[in-house]
Image (tube, grey):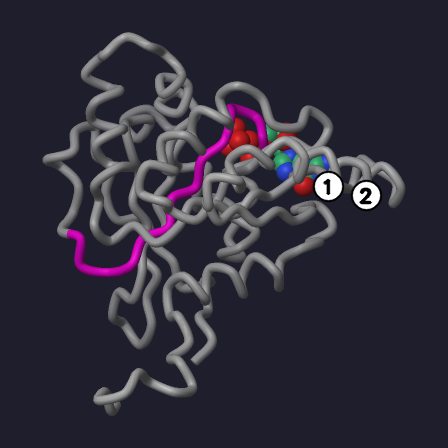
Amino acid sequence: MTINFHNTHFEISASRLIECPGASVPEIVFAGRSNAGKSTAVNTLCKQRQLAFASKTPGRTQLLNFFHVLEQGEPIARLVDLPGYGFAQLAQSSQSTWDKELGGYLAERPSLRGCVLIVDSRRGLLELDHALIEWVSKRKLPVHILLSKSDKFNRQEQVLALRAANKAVENHRATGHNISIQLWSALKKTGLPELENQLQAWIRPALPDNPPEGQTT
Ligand code: GDP
């Protein structure tokens, strides 16, 4: 069944790992430098105008903001917004509490299925983006990169941005890390089906056509 992300609601803000809700459903974390277009991307995906902007209100700019995706009233997944401020701490070498808490979440959260990394297509991948990929590469958590604001580019520039991003992640891929990249524009809704398909695949992976011998479903 196709997941409808329209039915997504704010659940809870956590400023410490211990405050995270139980790891009961598959989770997708959304990360990106401030102003990359992360809140707009989440809002576009969920077809809501204010949903993720709420993460920017005082009291919610914490470690992580959790959103429930509901289906027939039941939570089937969570979208997790990693605020730009928390994200920035990942590149710091200091072992602050923040690093440990966030690093702990990214490295150990059992329900985490994938990470959507929003990168401004005009700026490309910078140090912070690589820092995040490094963190999640420890557990080979798949990363899907949205090259945002692609509407600011003509077709040729888009192709070049995509090529540059693919080149930038070459080293990560060489270690076996699964990283996909797509063009994205919230303004023009470019790339929405592609993003939905990726999230669907993470939340509800297709069953194999031929289950291994001895296994029946
Ligand atoms: P965040 O800090 O990563 O959550 O970024 P926001 O979602 O708040 O977006 C930052 C700015 O970029 C805002 O002014 C948005 O209107 C703008 N923006 C976001 N997505 C797009 C897009 O797809 N195209 C264009 N042209 N602007 C965008």
- Residue underneath mark 2: 159
Rendering quadrant holding ligand 1: top right
Helix, strand or loop at disc 1? helix
Residue 62's x, y, as percent?
28, 27
- Residue underneath mark 1: 162
Would you say the residues marked 2 and 1 are in contact, meaning their CB atoms lie under 8 Å apart? yes
Residue 192's x, y, as percent?
62, 58
Q: Which residues are magenta?
A: 23-36
Query: Of the residues shown, which amino acid type is indicated by label 2?
Result: Val
Q: Which residue sits at x=37%, y=50%?
A: 28
**Residue furthest toward the top?**
94
User: Split into 4 quadrants, where in the image is the C terminus?
Assistant: bottom left
Q: Is residue 17 above or below residue 215?
A: above
Residue 216's x, y, as percent?
24, 91
Residue 178's x, y, as percent?
48, 49
Few, some or many residues within 10 Å of mark 2 (<14, 14–19, 20+): few
Disc 2 residue: CB within 8 Å of ligand 1? no
Q: Does 164 lie within the magenta span?
A: no
Disc 1 residue: CB within 8 Å of ligand 1? no
Query: Of the residues shown, which amino acid type is indicated by label 1?
Result: Leu
Residue 1 placement: quadrant: bottom left
Per the model, the C-alpha gap separating discs 2 and 1 is 5 Å
Q: Which residue sits at x=19%, y=16%?
A: 97
In front: 158, or 8? 158
Few, some or many residues within 10 Å of mark 1 (<14, 14–19, 20+): many
In front: 201, or 3? 201
Query: In the picture provided, is 1 more to the left or to the right than 122?
Result: left
Q: Does 25 lie within the magenta span?
A: yes
**Residue furthest toward the left?**
18
